[in-house]
Every structure is written in C-alpha cells, then in structure tokens.
Image (cartoon, grey):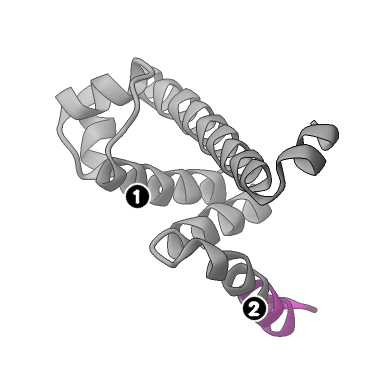
Amino acid sequence: MIGDLHRTGRSASRRCVNDFMLATEETEIIRIGAALRARIDETTLRDTASELGMSPAGLRLFASRSRPHSATMRRARAWFAGWNLQAGHVACAVEVALETLAAPLPEQRREAFRAECRRILACHCSD
C-alpha cells in the first residue's frame, strides 16, 4: 500500500483515507446495531423505536444490518451516547456525542472541532 501511494500520488492517499472513514463508519454501524438489538431483546421493538424517535419498521431494518439513512444514524448515535452514559461508559458516550456533533461539519474541520471540544471538557471536567 505504501508503494501504491508513492507510485500513484495524492489520489491514492485520498482513496485510502476514504476507505478508512468507510471502515470506521461500518464499525460504528455494527456497534450501534448490536446495542440496539440488545435493547430490543430487553424491551420490545416498539419501545426501543420510541426511545430513538423512529418507526418500528425503520428500526427493524437498521437492526437487521441494513445501511441506515443519515437521519436514522443521527438518532442512533444520540441514543447510543445516552445508552453508554447510563451504562457508566462515560468516555464512550462523550466520543459518540462528539462524533454526532461533528458529523455535519466539513470533513477537514471535524478533527479540529473534536480536539477543541475535548480540550474544553478537560478544562471544565477535571478534578
């Protein structure tokens, strides 16, 4: 892969970055989908859909591992952050919340935004 970058230049670099972003998003969808399926098992499809503010049919599609629409993904991320917070996984909840907040920003500004949010949180949340 490194050789490919040297031979093909900048376009290969962009492709690798995009492939990484897709892999990261796919991993996120899998993790959130697993949490949603666990919640459905604990309650019901209808109750879990209500928690997310979406239809049971839409949740059924997401839980069956289909690719969610962007609005569904925003709802699922927000739910997942709260779900992690309730489970005591504060760091994970914060990261999911930061990703949800950063998602509408242009890609080149997201990491700087997340870094600044982490800096502010460290200043205000440290002992």
Quick check: can you spot residue 44?
A: no
Which corner quadrant holds the N terminus? top right
Q: In this view of the protein, which residue sits in the foreground, 105 or 13? A: 13
Note whether 21 is above or below 116 in the view shown.
above
Local secondary structure at mark 2: helix
Q: In this picture, which residue range is highlighted in magenta? A: 117-127
Q: State the count of labels.
A: 2
**Disc 2 target residue:** 116
Q: Position of residue 63 (x, y in %)?
A: 35, 21
Residue 120 magenta? yes
Q: Amino acid at mark 1?
A: Arg
Q: On residue 5, which mark appears?
A: none
**Disc 1 target residue:** 74
Residue occupying the point 78% across, 38% down: 7
Residue occupying the point 50% across, 58% down: 97
Q: Quadrant of residue 58?
A: top left
Residue 96 vs residue 124: left or right? left
Q: Amino acid at mark 2?
A: Glu
Note whether 77 is above or below 40 in the view shown.
below
Judged by its main secondary structure, the magenta piece is helix
Local secondary structure at mark 1: helix
